[in-house]
Amino acid sequence: MPVRAPRICGCGKRIEQGLRCSCEQKRKAEADARRPSARERGYDSKWDVERKTFLKANPKCRRCPAQATVVDHIVPHRGDKRLFWSRSNWQPLCQSCHNRWKQSIERDKSDRAQRPNFGGEDG
């Protein structure tokens, strides 16, 4: 089985496959400490009831044939309660699709938004 080559972290350290650099671990811990809890972000008992109802009506993942376990916001609500509660902005996803596919899309959008656009790139 082929082994993926090590990568170079932004700090310049060589990092083996599947590992995180200490600077990445520190950055993630700092970001997690600043992030409000799920309950503070609106995922309360009312959400629990609505989520369960939505998944009962939409039992399959939108991307694969697996059982849906996550109600994903198609457009990230970023604290906008109207967008948060809009059922047209919800989609059923399995844990894998949510954690891999959807999160990578949001990470890519975030990375593009932070990169300067020098006229040659779209986005």
Image (tube, grey):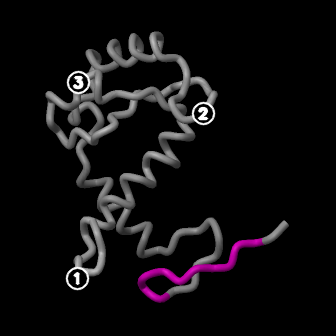
Give the amino acid at mark 3: Ser
Element marked by disc 3: loop
- The residue identified by callout 2 is 64
Residue 77 at x, y percent in the picture: 22, 38
- Quarter of image, res 42: top left
Residue drawn 57% across and 40% down? 96
Work out how far the residue at label 3 is from the one at label 1, CA to CA, in angstroms.
36 Å
Residue 3 at x, y percent in the picture: 76, 72
Residue drawn 50% across and 74% down? 21
- The residue identified by callout 3 is 86
Q: Nearer the viewer, mark 1 or mark 2?
A: 1
Element marked by disc 1: loop
Q: Nearer the viewer, mark 3 or mark 1?
A: 1
Give the amino acid at mark 2: Cys
Q: Earlier in the sequence, mark 1 or mark 2?
A: 2
Residue 107 at x, y percent in the picture: 38, 58
Work out how far the residue at label 2 is from the one at label 3, CA to CA, in angstroms.
23 Å
Q: Earlier in the sequence, mark 3 or mark 1?
A: 3
- The residue identified by callout 1 is 118
Segment colored magenta: 3-12
Q: Magenta span has 8?
A: yes
Asked if residue 63 is positioned above or below residue 34 in the image, the reply reads above
Residue drawn 25% across and 69% down? 114
| Helix, strand or loop: magenta stretch | loop
